[in-house]
Amino acid sequence: MIRRTPLVAPGGAAGARLGGAVLKLESAQRTGSFKLRGAAAAVAALTDGERAAGVVTASAGNHGAAMALVCGRAGVRLTAVVGATAPQVKRAAIVALGAELVVEGADYDEAEQAARELARARGARFVSPFDDDDVIAGNGGGVAAELLEQVPELARVVVPIGGGGLVAGLAAALAPRGVSVIGVQPAANCAMHDSLAGGRALIDYRGGPTVADALAGAVCERTYRICALHVESIALVSEADIRRAVGFLYREVGVIAEPSAAVGVAGFLAGAVTPARTGTTVVVISGANIDPDLLDAILAEPSID
């Protein structure tokens, strides 16, 4: 079920603007994002009783679709709760893959609260998109294992951060091997950055609106602790930077990336992220699920490159 996703090395002027960095296209994964890795690990770890009772999850969209695919194949009932900010393209994928979709709350954090309450009422297992050891190991650990095989001189990995499930698994696997892990977040909504700066996990966080919807919201103690130990730094990018990166990837590299997946490239274009001095730097493109209308709007914007 899990695809070994490809690496792309942009050439010419595009490659120069990325400092020679290589792109890891988790956007080419089934369901269009890295989330399938963690979902597969979480469902595989369910007990027989949990499978029989069904699963409830909360999602900004991609995790819900991944869980829907895996649960559908495993014969497990899934209810996915999303907030009002979840893009329509992601909602449609959850429904098309056979899960029950519930829209509750203004954003991801409110959707998670509703999902946890629903799971308790049903006696069902709640599977978090990031606050779960199996999800962390499946997502970040799975990508890390592939990178170590694909890139012999791996020196740095640049990765989007939301709740921290992807970066935590990557950093835990790669930092002890001497690979630096750099996170990137939207400046408008950057709970992990602010958590590390303040020395505590912001499990109750309200940031501003961001086009990078999948990265919005709070973090958890589990991912915070791992990031505090193993993530080298977190760069922040503006909303304009993120939109510019989506357009750059589409026009210059031929890659469709949702805004949350493009923040690493946004960091390079804005000068907030640089490649390692030696060895290979990889930028994780974490998902491709962008609403067509949003992509059209970004491509119609005047180029500021």
Image (tube, rainbow, N blue to C red):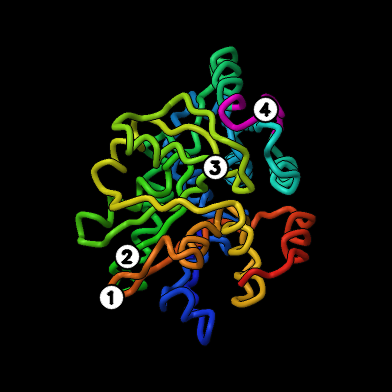
Q: Residues within 10 Å of mark 1 (few under 14, many from 20)?
A: some
Q: Identify the mark nearer the N-term, 2 or 3.
A: 2
Secondary structure of residue under mark 1: loop
Give the residue displayed 40% in from the left and 31% down from the top: 220
Q: Earlier in the sequence, mark 1 or mark 2?
A: 2
Q: Which residues are magenta?
A: 100-111
Q: Position of residue 38 (x, y in %)?
A: 46, 45
Q: Earlier in the sequence, mark 4 or mark 3?
A: 4
Name the residue tied to disc 2: 156
Residue 19: image location, x then y, percent: 41, 76
Q: Amino acid at mark 1?
A: Gly
According to the picture, the residue beneath numbered tag 3 turns out to be 188
Q: Residue at x 43, y 26 (%)?
A: 203
Q: Earlier in the sequence, mark 2 or mark 4?
A: 4
Answer whether labels 1 and 2 touch (C-beta < 8 Å): yes
Label whose residue precedes the other's in the sequence (3 or 1): 3
Q: Position of residue 49 (x, y in %)?
A: 48, 23
* Secondary structure of residue under mark 3: loop
Residue positioned 68% across, 70% down in the render: 303
